[in-house]
Each structure stands twice: as structure tokens, then as C-alpha cells.
Amino acid sequence: MKKILVAIMAMFLFIGCGSPEKEAEKVAIKFTEYFFESNTEEVFKLIYLSEQDLAIEGIEELVKGKLLSIMGTQKEKIKKMGGVKSITALSSKISEDKNTAIVELEIIFKNKEVKLDKIKLKKDHKDNWKVKL
């Protein structure tokens, strides 16, 4: 009975702890979804900024301004393709030091066009995956 209980607890521990690859993939997918939705606030939250960057006065407004500009040009392209049908992580590679990752995404648009994209990620000072631009 004791062995069964230990096995069940180990299973829950294993299930509850996401792998670094899966966590990086989730962030890359969310970032891409928010980007295609032109959700500047959520995209900004997922961008890697070093502690030095964060100390720069006005950095948030500067980055958000650039994002709005980029999103504006992409919005028309996405509209012409009928919008996004699905975003799937094909692969992820975590560095040896576990602080950087590259996630390859497959983006399928409603007009059946497929785009492959590689998203670079880095862990921030709070150990969260963020997209490195």
C-alpha cells in the first residue's frame, strides 16, 4: 500500500511540473497568438527586457510604440490570409544552461497558407520564459 501511495504521489509531482521545453513552447505560442490579435499589452508582458532595460525611463512606451507599428503592418497581411487557424509548436531546443530556448512554430492560416517561425526565448530575472527580440 505504501508503494502505491508513493507511486501516485510521484505521478502527480511529475504531471504538475512542466518541462522547460513545454513551458517555453507555451510562451512562444501565447506570444504569437497575442501578436496576431494585436494585443500590445499582453505581447509586452512576454517580451524579455533585462533589469538594465527596465531601468530606462520610458522603455515601456518605446517598446509598445514599436509593437503597434509592426502589428499595424501585419494586421492587413493576416486579414488577407483569412486569419489564423492554428499555432503549433513543432520543436523546442533548450540551451545547456537552461536559460535560453528556440521554439519552432507552425502557423496555419485560414486560407491554408503555412508559415514556420522560430521564436527565441530567454529566462528573465524572475526565472520566467520571455521572448527575446
Image (cartoon, helix red, strand yellow):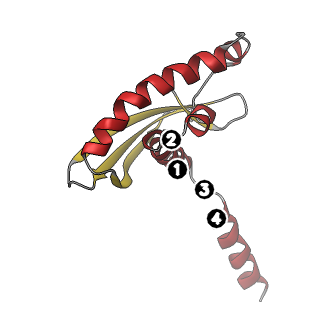
Kind of residue at disc 2: Phe
Give the distance between the C-alpha atoms of the residues marked 1 and 4, in whole angstroms.
18 Å
Q: Residue furthest bottom?
A: 1
Question: Disc 2, disc 3: CB below 8 Å?
Answer: no
10 Å neighbourhood of mark 1: few (<14), some, or many (≥20)? Answer: some
* Tag 1 secondary structure: helix
Q: Earlier in the sequence, mark 1 or mark 4?
A: 4
Q: Which residue is the site of mark 4?
A: 14
Give the distance between the C-alpha atoms of the residues marked 2 and 4, in whole angstroms.
26 Å
Taking depth in this image into account, of 18 and 48 the one nearest to the observer is 48
Question: Disc 3, disc 4: CB below 8 Å?
Answer: no
Report which quarter residue 14 is drawn in. bottom right
Q: Earlier in the sequence, mark 1 or mark 3?
A: 3
Q: Which residue is the site of mark 1?
A: 26
Q: Which residue is the site of mark 3?
A: 18
Instruction: Give residue 3's position: percent from left, percent from top.
Output: 73, 82
10 Å neighbourhood of mark 4: few (<14), some, or many (≥20)? Answer: few
Q: Identify the residue at horizontal 69%, vertical 71% (top origin).
A: 12
Q: Is 33 situated left or right of 126 in this image?
A: left
Q: Nearer the viewer, mark 3 or mark 4?
A: 3
Q: Nearer the viewer, mark 2 or mark 4?
A: 2
